[in-house]
Image: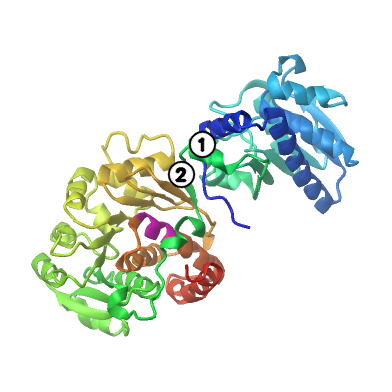
Amino acid sequence: MQRPIEILTPAEMGHADRLAAASGTPGPVLMDRAGRAVADAAERMLAARGGRRALVLCGPGNNGGDGFVAAAELRRRGFAVDVAALAPLEHLRGDAAGAAAAWAGPVGDAAGADPVAHDLVVDALFGAGLSRPLDGAAAVLVERVAAARRPVLAVDLPSGLSGESGAALGPAVRATETVTFFRLKPGHLLMPGRERCGPVTLADIGIDPAVLDGIGATLFHDLPDLWERHYPRPAAAGHKYTRGHLVVVSGPMPTLGAARLSARGGLRIGAGLVTVASPADALAIHAAQLTAVMLKPFDGPEALAGILADARLNAVVMGPGLGHGADAPALVAAALKPRGAPRAAVLDADALTLFAGRADDLAALVRGAGGPVVVTPHDGEFARLFDGAAGVLDAPTKVERARAGARRLGAVVVLKGPDTVVAAPDGRAAIAGEDAPWLATAGSGDVLAGMVGGLLAQAMPAFEAACAAVWLHAAVANHHGPGLISEDLPEALPAVLRALLARYGGR
């Protein structure tokens, strides 16, 4: 079954609920379906543990209403259910009040709830719309749930997390699993929310996907359905020259391996030809390690510019192992300067650190490049690059930081991490779709830069190329698993590509 790729902010989800109601699906119906989806997950979790007793903690809003529906459904299925409410029932309004009224059992005060006496806790206190830290009885209750060490099923989002940023606003629930509705929220995928949610079930509660037309979502889950239609497929009449020629610019000794990792990543992902442009004194070392990858020597920015004057070299990767020599900024400028046909560029690592605190200088080079530019910083490189750039580092979420950086540079930004965000200057953004802890190894980012470059060489659009490379990078790491080192990534890529293309065929 195809997973939806749109991600909605809490405000956009509220808009979706209103549009659904306006189109004939009233709130009580949506709440009933949501509560039943929660009951399904709770029943599965209880059965897996041989448990029979559930404690449902209900908050003062619609999240609490979902909890009351779930409690009634679990009791109907034969489970022992206790309900505890954070607020007096007479304070409930709207659909939540109706759901509470339909619950036939007693309602305890959440302040006296005992999670230890139950096999499962259902956290229906606060959903994704929370915007302030929990305090008072709510904060105490969340701490008590944590101390009980019982399995927790969160409704919509673990209470205490921001649905917008994934941040813990104060005391916050750590869920065993989470059930959410219609579309994921940023807080399900951004850290630490991603970790605190556990596995997330996305329940269909009958909201027509057509409501998305009235929302105009610009944030997406980085899954193949986002970009696969743009993924390059070799043509029967094609040849290596029609699949693009990627150049990876090497720095001096001793950091030569990084450029070779990038080159191998670009070659494995399908670039027809890959060349490492190398300082002359490092040529022999590269030659001893490279076979399918070609070599061209250069000595300084002018010589590199001469190599890149060949219009057939349509993509360049700079940064891995580039170093911080006196001529390094001029090398970056030479790579970005248009010469004839437009050339795509990927800037990583040293190519970004060279412009620490000078983002506008780099933006000027990007504007003059003539072709698409992708930058691939991790958080530290991003912070150094945009040091002093108002409105970037102080943006409230990782998504908004990446978007602000992309607008400032005029480039696609791949802000790396366990929750990698890809952002385009036009406002589109995507959050990584796969957890891949095996990628925490030296050189993996160099391979990613080469993969992006290899896709750009094949004329894949920059935003989609970056998203595809990020997803494939993680998928390859998970395919390999324990013991992964960066050299393994390009070699494991064919198996993942084979499965991807088998699923999507030749379209």
| Range of magenta residues | 463-469
Residue lying at 37% horizontally and 42% vertically, measured from the top left: 427
Residue drawn at (11%, 72%), measured in percent from left and top?
299
Which residue appears at 55% of the width and 41% of the height? 210
Alpha-carbon distance for marks 1 and 2?
Answer: 9 Å
User: In the image, 72: left or right of 378?
Assistant: right
- In this view of the protein, which residue sits in the foreground, 397 or 487? 397
Question: What residue is pinned by disc 2?
Answer: 219
Indicate the position of residue 452 as horizontal and vertical percent values.
36, 63
Query: Do callouts 1 and 2 mark residues in contact (Cβ within 8 Å)?
Result: yes
Judge left or right: residue 441 versus residue 13: left
Does the magenta run of residues contain 467?
Answer: yes
Residue 163: quadrant of the picture = top right
Quadrant of the frame with the N terminus: bottom right
Chain-order first, disc 1 or disc 2: 1
Instruction: Give the main secondary structure of the magenta stretch.
Output: helix
Residue 487 in sight here: yes
The type of colouring in the image is: rainbow
Q: Which residue is mark 1?
A: 9
Residue 129 in view here: no
Question: Hey, which residue is sitting farthest top in the picture?
Answer: 90
